[in-house]
Image: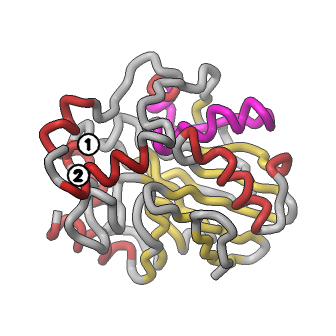
């Protein structure tokens, strides 16, 4: 465990010549893949997390100038937001599932809005979550105008392998990293969320799902994976069979 200097925690999984780091905050996570001095960034938190992303890179001994590219699990503001300003400052490409490109460019928006959240706002945990994410830029609608689909081949530090997980958004993608021992699951499979009553592997609240049935099918597909560690988009790292975690999520959610 790397002790944080800011409001995040970093844990790592080593695999050969590369290391995968999960950077966890109390509202969202991102992932760093480091191979030599080169870095692949997966997601970037809310707009207000950009400086924390930079600090997390420095804490693992890197520099933001070492980012060779970023990967996006999906284009919700809490995963895309920090990338908007970071890639303007450090000039790296942002890749994603081809279906998600138009969402990241903001040709359309598949994101929970007031109509989805207001019915839940009477709950204290939802109010606490809103009090945290509003200053971080939850209302931002900025996109990445030159968002790109995965290149062929996808040859990036840490050798991430995309795993289609459509449903939470139309083009949501997970990634196998650390020689396929770790699943970076984005919001397809999480281990907690500030508005959730439960902890441990679970499907995210229906309020945030674009297509709940397809999202559950995506989690069902994870039950065939051999990964032994989960790096979720929300909640703490989960060690143990990812297939079992996916099965548990479908049971409790």
- Determine the residue positioned at 19% across, 44% down: 121
- Determine the residue positioned at 53% across, 51% down: 162
Q: Is residue 142 above or below residue 234?
A: above
Q: Position of residue 23 (x, y in %)?
A: 59, 64
Tell whether label 1 touches label 2 (CB within 8 Å). Answer: yes
User: Horizontal placement of 84 versus 77: left or right?
Assistant: right
**Label 1, residues with CA under 10 Å away: few <14, some 14-19, many ≥20:** many
Q: Quadrant of residue 62?
A: bottom right
Q: Which residue is mark 1?
A: 209
Q: What secondary structure do most residues of the magenta stretch adopt?
A: helix
Q: How is the image coloured?
A: secondary structure
User: Horizontal placement of 173 versus 113: left or right?
Assistant: right
What is the secondary structure assignment of the residue under circle 1? loop
Magenta range: 77-101
Residue 222 visible in the snapshot: no
Q: Which residue is mark 2?
A: 205
**Label 2, residues with CA under 10 Å away: few <14, some 14-19, many ≥20:** few
Quarter of the image for the C terminus: give it.
bottom left
Q: Nearer the viewer, mark 2 or mark 1?
A: 2
Q: 104 or 120, which lies in front?
A: 120
């Amino acid at each position: 465990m790397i002790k944080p200097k800011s409001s995040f925690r970093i844990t790592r999984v080593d695999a050969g010549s590369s290391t995968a780091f999960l950077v966890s905050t109390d509202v969202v996570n991102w992932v760093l893949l480091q191979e030599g001095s080169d870095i692949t960034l997966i997601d970037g938190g809310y707009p207000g997390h950009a400086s924390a992303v930079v600090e997390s890179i420095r804490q693992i001994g890197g520099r933001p100038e070492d980012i060779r590219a970023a990967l996006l699990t999906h284009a919700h503001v809490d995963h895309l937001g920090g990338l908007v300003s970071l890639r303007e400052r450090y000039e790296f490409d942002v890749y994603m599932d081809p279906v998600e490109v138009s969402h990241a460019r903001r040709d359309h928006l598949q994101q929970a809005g007031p109509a989805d959240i207001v019915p839940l706002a009477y709950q204290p945990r939802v109010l606490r979550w809103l009090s945290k994410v509003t200053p971080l830029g939850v209302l931002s609608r900025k996109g990445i105008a030159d968002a790109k689909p995965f290149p062929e081949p996808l040859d990036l530090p840490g050798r991430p392998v995309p795993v289609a997980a459509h449903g939470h958004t139309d083009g949501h993608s997970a990634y196998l990293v650390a020689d396929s021992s770790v699943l970076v699951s984005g919001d397809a499979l999480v281990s907690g969320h500030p508005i959730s009553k439960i902890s441990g592997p679970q499907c995210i609240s229906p309020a945030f799902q674009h297509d709940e049935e397809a999202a559950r099918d995506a989690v069902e597909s994870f039950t065939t994976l051999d990964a032994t560690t989960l790096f979720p988009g929300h909640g703490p790292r989960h060690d143990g069979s990812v297939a079992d975690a996916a099965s548990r999520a479908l049971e409790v959610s």
